[in-house]
Image: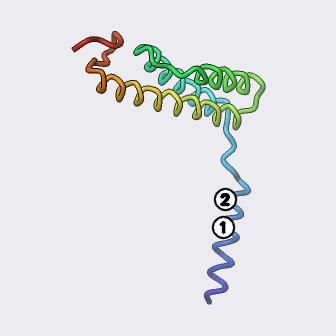
């Protein structure tokens, strides 16, 4: 019985993997839009890492080439870089006693 359950589970996993979640143009577009929003938020506080726009451009190029899986991966990477930069900017602002607002960095 245990062997049957293991076999069924394995077959189910393989079937799901076979219908892998290949990214579509819409997926790539959504991922790139999310990355652009995160990059814009980080740029607004003037605390952007230099690699982030490069990775975002690579995502856009992959989308244009129809490589949607790559575009999604690179866009998510760019979004993560932007989020990390923003968090670092917030941490640095706390250390030096300034505030981060929608208008950028302001003295307290």
Tell me the tag on residue 21. none
Task: Pinpoint residue 66: horizontal percent, then vertical percent.
Answer: 76, 28
Image quarter in which the C terminus is found = top left
Left or right of residue 39: residue 96: left
- On the image, the x and y values in percent for residue 50 come to 58, 20
Q: Quadrant of the N terminus?
A: bottom right
Identify the residue at image location x=73%, y=56%: 18
| Looking at the image, residue 4 lies above or below residue 13 | below
User: Which image quarter: residue 49?
Assistant: top right
Q: Is residue 77 left or right of residue 41?
A: right
Using the image, determine if residue 77 lies above or below residue 64: below
Relative side of 99 to 76, left or right:
left
Helix, strand or loop for disc 2: helix
In the displayed structure, would residue 7 be above or below residue 87? below
Q: Which residue is mark 2?
A: 16
Check disc 2: other Cα within 10 Å, few if <14, some if 14-19, many if 20+: few
Q: Position of residue 96 (x, y in %)?
A: 30, 21
Residue located 47% across and 32% down the image? 84
Evaluate if marks 1 and 2 touch, with contact meaning CB atoms under 8 Å apart.
yes
Find the residue positioned furthest to the right. 65
Give the distance between the C-alpha atoms of the residues marked 1 and 2, in whole angstroms.
Answer: 6 Å
Which quarter of the picture shows residue 63?
top right
Regarding mark 1 in the picture, which secondary structure is present there? helix
Q: Residue at x 62, y 81 (%)?
A: 5
Report crowding for label 1: few under 14, some 14 to 19, many 20 or more residues within 10 A (C-alpha). few
Depth check: give the residue in front, 63 or 1.
Answer: 63
Which residue is found at the position 70% from the left and 38% from the top? 69
Of residue 14 and residue 92, the one placed in the foreground of this image is 92
Residue lying furthest bottom in this view? 1
Residue where numbered disc 1 is placed? 12
Q: Nearer the viewer, residue 28 or 47?
A: 47
User: Residue 32: percent from the left, percent from the top?
Assistant: 59, 26
């Amino acid at each position: 019985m245990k062997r049957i359950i293991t076999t069924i589970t394995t077959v189910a996993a393989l079937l799901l993997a076979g219908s892998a979640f290949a990214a579509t143009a819409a997926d790539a577009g959504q991922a790139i839009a999310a990355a652009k929003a995160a990059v814009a938020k980080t740029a607004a506080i003037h605390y952007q890492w230099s690699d982030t726009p490069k990775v975002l451009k690579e995502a856009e190029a992959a989308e244009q080439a129809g490589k949607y899986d790559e575009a999604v991966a690179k866009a998510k990477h760019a979004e993560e870089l932007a989020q990390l930069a923003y968090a670092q900017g917030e941490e640095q602002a706390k250390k030096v006693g300034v505030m981060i607002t929608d208008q950028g960095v302001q003295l307290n």
